[in-house]
């Protein structure tokens, strides 16, 4: 369904896909990846385009504003599917509850004990590299941010449809463990 509001074409998805695309090319790019995602429940999330998007470290592909229920993108069409899934799963992480978040943290602790290198996206990898010895034990903000980004990057790896990407550097046995975790813990209609 499409509608014009304030001179901007907005493309709405079905109720189980509560996204409002304000940039029609993003709506077209999202169609294939939306078929691979589980159904979602929640108020609509606005998907916007903002060229030149930056954070304090420099240019970024996207940013999720959870309380505003919007995501802004600045990525190439080639990167859009992976980045879209990553950003949507920030909303999932926000709502999945402490028990599932702590369960995912345990997967990551086990990987660290096994000295797993790499990650499934740069946003998690640089945070993993920045962890100090006390961060895991104290569940520091740095650790919690790494867990969130790892969760979102793992979802992007699972659901984007990409089999290979330069940022998928985590070894196969650890990928398999994450895949099993998602299969058991992330199913049914997800609240966003």
Image: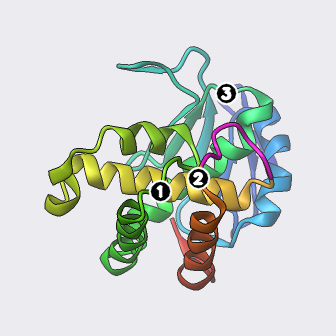
Numbered disc in front, either 3 or 1: 1
The crowd level at tag 1 (other Cα within 10 Å; few <14, some 14-19, many 20+) is some
Position of residue 44 in the picture relative to residue 127 (left or right)? right
Determine if residue 78 is in view: yes
**Could you tell me residue 76's position as x and y percent?**
74, 26
* Helix, strand or loop for the magenta stretch, by majority: loop
**CA gap, disc 3 and disc 1:** 29 Å
* Disc assigned to residue 192: none
Viewer-proximal residue among 61 and 3: 61
The crowd level at tag 2 (other Cα within 10 Å; few <14, some 14-19, many 20+) is some
**Marks 2,1: beta carbons within 8 A:** yes
**CA gap, disc 2 and disc 1:** 7 Å
The residue lying at 41 percent from left, 55 percent from top is: 148
Could you say which quadrant of the image residue 104 lies in?
Answer: bottom left
The crowd level at tag 3 (other Cα within 10 Å; few <14, some 14-19, many 20+) is many
Q: Which residue is mark 2?
A: 170
Position of residue 30 in the picture relative to residue 84 (left or right)? right
**Could you tell me residue 80's position as x and y percent?**
72, 38
**For numbered disc 3, what is the local secondary structure?**
loop
Q: Earlier in the sequence, mark 2 or mark 1?
A: 1
Q: How is the image coloured?
A: rainbow
Viewer-proximal residue among 148 and 134: 134
Q: Is residue 120 in the magenta section? A: no
The residue lying at 53 percent from left, 49 percent from top is: 119
Q: Earlier in the sequence, mark 3 or mark 2?
A: 3
Viewer-proximal residue among 116 and 122: 116
Q: Which residue is mark 1?
A: 116
Residue stretch in magenta: 162-169
Q: Which residue is mark 3?
A: 75
């Amino acid at each position: 369904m499409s509608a014009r509001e304030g001179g901007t074409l907005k493309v709405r998805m079905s109720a189980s896909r509560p996204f409002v695309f304000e940039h029609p090319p993003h709506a077209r790019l999202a169609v294939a990846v939306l078929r691979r995602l589980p159904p979602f429940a929640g108020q609509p999330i606005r998907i916007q385009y903002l060229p030149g998007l930056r954070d304090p470290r420099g240019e970024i592909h996207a940013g999720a504003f959870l309380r505003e229920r919007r995501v802004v993108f600045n990525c190439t069409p080639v990167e859009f599917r992976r980045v879209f899934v990553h950003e949507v799963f920030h909303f999932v992480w926000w709502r999945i509850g402490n028990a599932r978040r702590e369960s995912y943290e345990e997967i990551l602790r086990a990987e660290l004990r096994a000295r797993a290198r790499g990650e499934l996206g740069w946003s998690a990898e640089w945070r993993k590299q920045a962890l100090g010895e006390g961060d895991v034990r104290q569940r520091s903000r740095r650790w919690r941010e790494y867990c969130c980004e790892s969760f979102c990057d793992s979802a992007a790896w699972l659901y984007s449809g990409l089999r290979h990407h330069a940022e998928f550097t985590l070894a196969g046995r650890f990928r398999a463990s994450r895949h099993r975790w998602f299969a058991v813990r992330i199913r049914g209609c997800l609240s966003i």
